[in-house]
Amino acid sequence: MEPILTVDNLKTAFLTSSGKVQAVRGVSFSLNKGEIVGIVGESGSGKSVTSMSILRLLPDTARIDPESSILFEGRDLSRLPKKQLRDIRGQKIAMIFQDPMSSLNPLIPVGNQVEEMIKIHHRELSGEELRKRALALFQDVRIPEPEKRFAQYPHQFSGGMRQRVMIAMALANRPDLLIADEPTTALDVTIQDQILKQLRALQREWNTAIIFITHDLGVVAELCQRVLVMYGGLIMEESPIDDLFERPRHPYTLGLLRSIPALNQDKGARLDSIPGSPPDMTNPPAGCPFAPRCPYARQICARELPPYAAVGEGHRSMCWLLQPDAPAEGNPFREEEAR
Amino acid sequence: MSGPILEVTDLTQHFPVNRRDVVHAVDGVTFSIQRGQTLGLVGESGCGKSSCARSIIRVYDPTGGRIVLDGEEITHMSQKELQPRRKKMQMIFQDPYASLNARMTVRDIIAEPLLAHHVVKSREEANDYVYPMLERVGLTREHAGRYAHEFSGGQRQRVGIARALVLRPELVICDEPISALDVSIQAQVVNLLRDYQQEQGLAYLFIAHDLSMVRYVSDLVGVMYLGQLVELCAAEEIYAHPLHPYTQGLLSSIPVANPKLAREKEQSGIEGDLPSPVNPPSGCRFHTRCPFAKEVCSQEAPCMKEVSPGHQTACHLY
C-alpha cells in the first residue's frame, strides 16, 4: 500500500538560554491511508514535538534539521513555503489537542467557529450552505440537540462536548490525516470511552488516517493498529499492536507494561517500577537514552546508540540485546526465545 | 487501640453559589476506615470525592453529618481545638508543582510541620527527622538544601509525601497523588506508599480516577456519583461483581492494556454527560444515564443496603 505520510530522519531542536534541547533526534516512520498509529511515550519523550513538526506548528525557537524530510502526498512539508502549508493545515491534515477549552474562542458561538473552519477552505459557499454543513458535522460527532447547541458559547459545553466540537472542526474538510495529541487525557474515563468510539467510527466511515499521541497504553490497545514507543527523542520500538503487547522487544516497553497494574494483578506483589527519571535532553546520553534506567544495560549501551533490529513482521526495536553478538545470559529476549 | 481510625456518617457538604442555588458537592456519605487499611474512593470529576476529603480534613465546615477521628468527633471543632489533632491526619496533594512553596528549601518544607506541631524546637533539631525521612522516600540528604523547581514531578511528589509522613500520622488522605505523574513514575510512588504502610501501619484514604491503581492499593473501594456513595465493598469484589449500573459502566469504560481483550470487550460504557450538581436529578441521581432505569428510580432515592456480606450498594435493582 502507498503510504500517505513518510517521515524520514526527523530531527527537531529548540534553542533555549540553557542550550540546545534536542527534542526529536532522528525519527522515521510512515503511515498508510486509513491507518491508526499510536505514538506512546512519557513527558519529554518527543512525541508531541514529532507531531507538531509535521504541520510545523512550532515556536520560533524550534529548528527542524535540513536533512529531515516529511513527505505528504509527494510534497516535503518540512520545506514547503508557509502559504502552501496553510492550504494543507485544516484541509488535508487536521489536528486536535489535549485542552479543548484553550483551543476554542470563548467570545464566538461554537457553531460559527465550525462554520469558519469550512469557510477558510471553501470561500465560494453561501451562509446558508455553511450553516447546513456545520450542522451536519454536529450530527456526525453526535452532539445532542445540534440546533440549540449551535448558538451556544464554549463555556456552556462540558469538556467532552468541547472535544466533540474540536473533532467536528478537525473533520470539517474531510482531511486525509488527523493528528490527535492526547485528546482524551483531560477527560473522564466514561467520556474518553465515548470519544474513542467516535474516532473509530469516523475512521471507518471516512477512511481517515489517524496519528494518536498518548501516554496511556490502554488507549493504544483499544484504538490503534500500530504503535511507536518513543523515549529520549527516539523511536525505541515500532510494532503492530498485538505483537507489542504479546512480544515486547525493548526493555523500556517491558518496563512500561509491567508498571501498570492489571485488573487481575496479585495485590501481594510489588509493582515493577522503572527506577530513575527520563534523560535531560539538553545533554542527551551518547548511547541508548534508556541505558541509565535499564536493568539489563551493559557497557556498550552507555557508549553507543544501538541500530534497529528487525524482530518480526513490521516490528523493529533499538536495543543492543537484540544484536546477533549479544550475550544470552541475563538477556530477557534470548531467554524467552530459548523457552 | 481499637475502633476505626476514621468514621464518616452521613457527611454533607453544600456550597452556595448565589442566593438561590446550592452545589450539592457531598450528600450523605457514610464510610469508615480501619487502622492500617486503605479505602479507595473513585468517581468522575465533579463526583465530590475531593470535596469529601477536604471536609474530612476540615478545610471546609461540613454542612451536616459526623466526622469521628480516632474516637473523637471533629465535625464542628474550632481550628484551635483541631490543631493538636491534625498530627494524626495529613494530606498528600495531586499537583506536586502547586503544593510545594517555591521559596522554601526542601529541608524547610519537611521541617515546617515538625515546628508547627512543636515536635522539635529548632530547625537544627528538625534535621534529625528530615534526613531519615528524605532517605526513606528515596531522596538523599544532599537534596535538603534545594528548592522544589530543581526537581522532577516524581521527586516533588516524594517531597510532598515526606512532608505528610514526617509527623507519623495515623491517617493520610491522598488526593489523586499519582495522576499528574508519568506511568513509569506512578509505580515508584505507589510502591513507596505501600511499603511505608506495611512498616508503620497507617491508614490511607486514597482518591483517584485510575481504577486499576485503586484496586491494587485499596482494601475497600467506594464509588461516588454526583456527591453520593453508590457502592462500597472489598476491592476485589468491586471488579469481580460490580452491582451498581454506574460501577459497571465505569469499569467497562476503562481502556484495557490488552488488544485482544479490548476487541472482545462489550461495547457498553455510559452515554451522556454528568448532570449539574446544582440541580441533581430526582430519585436515583444516576437514572438519567442508567440503561436499567425503572419508574421508581426517578421518584425515590435508593438507600445503601447490604446486598451480599460486606457489599453495599444504593440501587433499586437490588
Image (cartoon, rainbow, N blue to C red):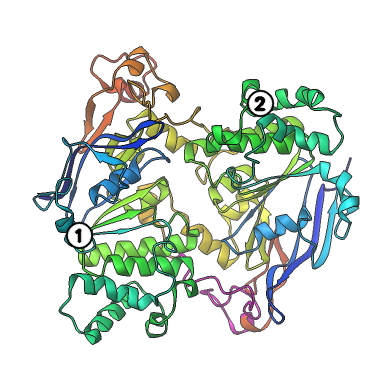
| Relative image position of residue B82 (x, y in whole percent) | 87, 50
Subunit that carries the residue with mark 2: B
Q: Amino acid at mark 2?
A: Ala
Q: How many marks?
A: 2
**Residue depicted at 52% across the width and 42% down the height:** B181
The vertical placement of B27 against B111, above or below, is below
Name the element at disc 1.
helix
Q: Which residue is mark 1?
A: A86
Nearer-the-camera pick, A336 or B66 = B66
Q: Are marks 2 and 1 in contact (CB under 8 Å)?
A: no
Horizontal side, residue B189 vs residue B74: left or right: left
Q: In what quadrant of the picture does the C terminus of chain B appear? A: bottom right
Subunit that carries the residue with mark 1: A
The vertical placement of A99 against A267, above or below, is below
**Residue depicted at 50% across the width and 27% down the height:** A276
The label shown at residue B120 is none
| Relative image position of residue A231 (x, y in whole percent) | 36, 34
Question: In which image quadrant can residue A295 be found?
Answer: top left
Q: Amino acid at mark 1?
A: Arg
Q: Which residues are magenta?
A: B269-297
Q: In what quadrant of the picture does the N terminus of chain B appear? A: top right
Nearer-the-camera pick, B259 or A106 = A106
Binning the other alpha carbons within 10 Å of mark 1 as few (below 14), some (14 to 19) or many (20 upward) gives some
Between the C-alphas of marks 2 and 1, the distance is: 51 Å
Horizontal side, residue A193 vs residue B47: left or right: left
Residue sticking out furthest to the bottom = A128
The vertical placement of B220 against B15, above or below, is above
Binning the other alpha carbons within 10 Å of mark 2 as few (below 14), some (14 to 19) or many (20 upward) gives some
Horizontal side, residue A208 vs residue B118: left or right: left
| Relative image position of residue B299 (x, y in whole percent) | 66, 84
